[in-house]
């Protein structure tokens, strides 16, 4: 399946907060064979959130949204999701009653327990605001521990597909291996090959749904590198 992740929050756009949520979800989805095709960050604005969610729904099989589910003035994600589906925000009685054990602030209770009509609640075991699913969208809290708690429950709904990965570490620079890497890419169009420059070396990742093809791509690349070293030594 193809996924789009939408992270909501002015603090992400200002650089005050690092978007670890998107990284966490993308890694977990990739490891079970799914593909994240977009990661989008939007401000705490109803129109911006609604616009991006609507567009994402047309491009992906499923959309994951994090942030903006709290009780403050800038927590407007649920309002935006309700706008997308053209439904009302309604107070979920079970959420309201559960939250009442922790606070008597009526405004906070009503806001946090208000979700788009028809949404399915996903309970948050480590915080206040629950996650919920509506249509092909899952909406989760932005606090990392709370996002992880609810995301892991949502993740169980998706099939675990075959996924294999091989890693090769090459001392030097990308320019020195470019031709050989391109030959492998051409030979193995069904294998995703990523090149990631680091300090003093390059990390090459080979991944895909067929273990033999992934392994063969890595082995071809390593052979090309070894042939290059032999030629240099012979000269």
Image: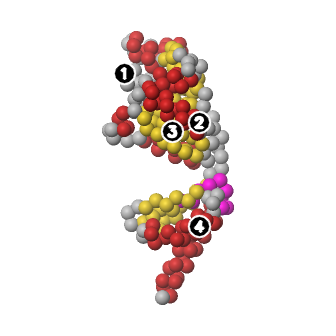
Residue 73: numbered disc: 1
Instruction: Please give the name of the residue rendered at 51% of the width and 20% of the height, measured from the top-left corner.
Output: 115
Residue 184: numbered disc: 4
Residue 179: numbered disc: none
Residue 145, picture quadrant = top left
Give the vertical position of 71 relative to 175 (above or below). Answer: above
Is tag 1's residue or tag 4's residue first in the polypeptide sequence?
1
Residue 5: numbered disc: 3
Is tag 2's residue or tag 1's residue first in the polypeptide sequence?
2
Residue matched to label 2: 58
Is tag 2's residue or tag 3's residue first in the polypeptide sequence?
3
Circle 2 or circle 3, nearest the eye: 2
Q: In this view, does 196 lie to the left or right of 193?
A: left
Label 1, secondary structure: give it.
loop
Is tag 2's residue or tag 4's residue first in the polypeptide sequence?
2
Label 2, secondary structure: give it.
helix
Classed neighbour count for the residue bearing mark 4: other residues with Cα under 10 Å, few (<14), some (14–19), many (≥20): some
**What is the magenta range?**
205-213
Label 3, secondary structure: give it.
strand
Residue 108, picture quadrant = top left
Give the vertical position of 3 relative to 118 (above or below). Answer: below
């Amino acid at each position: 399946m193809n996924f789009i992740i939408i992270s909501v929050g002015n603090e992400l756009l200002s650089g005050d907060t690092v978007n670890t949520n998107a990284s966490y979800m993308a890694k977990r989805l990739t490891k079970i064979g799914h593909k994240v095709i977009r990661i989008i960050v939007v401000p705490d604005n109803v129109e911006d959130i609604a616009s991006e969610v609507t567009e994402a729904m047309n491009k992906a099989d499923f959309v994951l949204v994090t942030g903006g589910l709290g009780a403050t003035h800038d927590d407007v994600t649920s309002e935006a999701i309700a706008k997308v589906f053209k439904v009302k925000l309604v107070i979920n009685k079970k959420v309201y009653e559960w939250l009442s054990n922790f606070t008597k602030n009526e405004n906070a209770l009503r806001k946090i327990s208000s979700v788009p009509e028809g949404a399915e609640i996903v309970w948050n075991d480590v915080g206040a605001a629950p996650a919920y699913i509506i249509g092909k969208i899952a909406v989760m809290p932005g606090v990392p521990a709370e996002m992880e708690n609810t995301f892991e429950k949502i993740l169980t709904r998706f099939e675990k597909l075959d996924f294999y990965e091989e890693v090769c570490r090459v001392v030097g620079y990308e320019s020195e291996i470019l031709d050989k890497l391109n030959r492998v890419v051409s030979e193995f169009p069904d294998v995703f090959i990523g090149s990631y420059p680091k300090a003093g070396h390059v990390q090459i990742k080979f991944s895909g749904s067929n273990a033999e093809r992934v392994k063969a791509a890595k082995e071809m690349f390593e052979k090309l590198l070894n042939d290059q070293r032999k030629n240099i030594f012979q000269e």
